[in-house]
Image (spheres, rainbow, N blue to C red):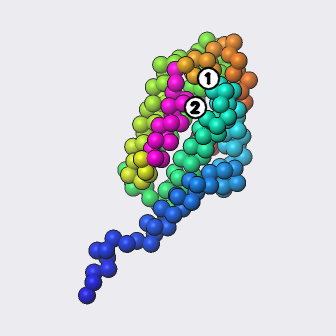
Amino acid sequence: MVDVMSEGFKAGDIGLRAQKKILSRMANKNVAKVFIDDTAASLLDNVYKLAKVYTGNKKEAEKLVKNIIKVVIKLGVLYRNGQFSRDELKQAERFKGRFHSAAMAVVSFYEVDFSYDRHYLLTALNESRAAMRQLVQQHLTDKSLARIDSVFGFFADPNFLDAVFRKDSEYREYLGRIVADMNRAMDEGGM
């Protein structure tokens, strides 16, 4: 008699892997709408515009936003399928707190003149990255972890931050739109 349980085959695991794979290949606006609300979509559109203007590279800006969408979708799939342990859910709360602090700092630095603190924001972003990686490292591939690093690496670039938060910044209009979307998202219970 064959012990079926020791074979390691689980349809649920295969289904989850298939969902993550399919969704990561279809990271476009139509799929994103299932997982991302209108406010978050507007935020991502404005992040794209800022990244495109800052880098001067449409493909790089598209890749950044696609990576954000893929990570958000995969987190959503993992959460909705109950894949996080109790400890990982606690880690998710730590990530959420750190990321919220970073978001609040961005809003504050935009709204209050001469309040920009590069060190504080870099620390908040790097702590957010570490918390997210710790949360998902058992669930996602190295390629997905590299996407997380790429996204946080873009935003935690000191040159980018200095250019964006300079009082006379050419990116101030784009940052203003992003901050408005972030405020709306926080009011709606997101971020």
Q: Quadrant of the C terminus?
A: top right
Residue tagged 2: 103
Quarter in which the N terminus is drawn = bottom left
Toward the viewer: 184 or 30? 30
Image location (x, y in percent) of residue 31: 66, 55
The percent position of residue 22, horizontal first and vertical second, equals 57, 60
Q: Residue at x 43, y 51 (%)?
A: 141
The stretch in magenta equals: 143-158
Tell whether 172 sits left or right of 116.
right
Q: Residue at x 44, y 51 (%)?
A: 140
Foreground of the two, 14 or 93: 14
- Residue 175 left/right relative to 125: right
Asked if residue 97 can be seen in this view, the reply is no
Picture coordinates of residue 152 (x, y %)? 51, 34
Q: Which mark is residue 61?
A: none
Quick one: label 2, few (<14), some, or many (20+) residues within 10 Å? Answer: many
Residue for point 41% across, 37% down: 130
